[in-house]
Amino acid sequence: MGLTRSEIFTEEQNRLATMLKALAHPARIAILQQIIKANACICGQLVDELGLAQATISQHLKELKNAGIIQGTIEGVTVCYCIEPKAWKLLQKDLSIFFKSFDVKNCC
Amino acid sequence: MGLTRSEIFTEEQNRLATMLKALAHPARIAILQQIIKANACICGQLVDELGLAQATISQHLKELKNAGIIQGTIEGVTVCYCIEPKAWKLLQKDLSIFFKSFDVKNCC
DNA sequence: TTACAATATTGCAATTTTACGATTGATTGG
DNA sequence: CCAATCAATCGTAAAATTGCAATATTGTAA
């Protein structure tokens, strides 16, 4: 079919998967690293740094914004993007819990 | 186009994105949670627990296996799946570093 | 060997993702 | 107001993802 059957999973499973999907692209990882490094970044800068078209970068920024990971502030002609600390910390915590839930035991 | 331009990103960015993509589906989150909870899990069990077809579960297991996150051991007729500790710990560490790289500062 | 059970694989349709050119919208400078 | 600049959106094409029925494969038991 091609559409995820979200209705059979828990709210938490869907939420975590959605956030991970937002991160699951090298361009979006690169964008986040750049934003973190520069502590705020404008779209044009990203277009210069990464080798992608402006429309493509804008689309990736939109996905990160939709997921709530970044926020954009209009500053005249440009838009300043930065990390949304609350969402960042929450995802960090959720992932930390998820990864810690596995403890190595004797297995098959 | 529809294909990720991996060649313009670093090895690290691509690797992290690939691993995140493997996790970025509620069914695969659910499968991992179940494997962790049961400390090993057979495919049939997962088909019963989650509400997906056997072929679909098998496909998700294959993706997790391809990413190196789980490993499957054939035990007669059944296959026992469990977490691959090395890959798990490595991803945990990489994500931890990634998330810690952001420190809240005054921004726009 | 034959039958059965558990998984894997194949083939297909619907949907989503990725990428980009072209265009539009918004803001500033002259 | 008009031109220039930056970013968002639209439209489109190619490719990847999701899901499942049908089938194949593999190992066990009779």
Image (cartoon, coloured by chain):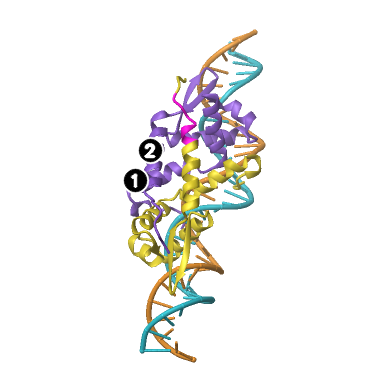
Chain colours: A yellow, B purple, C cyan, D orange
Label 2 chain ID: B
Looking at the image, which is closer to me, B2 or B85?
Answer: B85
**A34 in relation to B19, above or below:** below
Quickly name the residue at label 2: B93
Quickly name the residue at label 1: B12
**A11 in relation to B55, above or below:** below
The quarter holding residue B90 reads: top left
Is D28 on the left or on the right of B18, as rendered?
Answer: right
Image spot of residue A18 (x, y percent) = 54, 48
Are the residues flagged by discs 2 and 1 from a single subunit?
A: yes
Residue A68 among magenta residues: no
Residue A101 among magenta residues: yes
Looking at the image, which is closer to me, A87 or A65?
Answer: A87
Q: Is residue B63 visible?
A: no
- Neighbours of disc 2 within 10 Å: few (<14), some (14-19), many (20+): some
Residue at 47% x, 63% y: name it: A72
**C2 in relation to A54, above or below:** above
Q: Secondary structure at mark 2?
A: helix
In the displayed orientation, state which residue is furthest to the front. B106
Q: What type is the residue that disc 2 sits on?
A: Lys
Image spot of residue A47 (x, y percent) = 37, 64
Is A101 on the left or on the right of B55, as rendered?
Answer: left
Q: What type is the residue that disc 1 sits on?
A: Glu
State which region is magenta. Answer: A98-104
Closer to viewer: mark 2 or mark 1: 2
Looking at the image, which is closer to me, A17 or B11?
Answer: A17
Q: Which mark is residue B95?
A: none
Of label 2 and label 1, which has the lower sequence position? 1
Residue at 48% x, 40% y: name it: A95
- Neighbours of disc 1 within 10 Å: few (<14), some (14-19), many (20+): few
Q: Secondary structure at mark 1?
A: helix
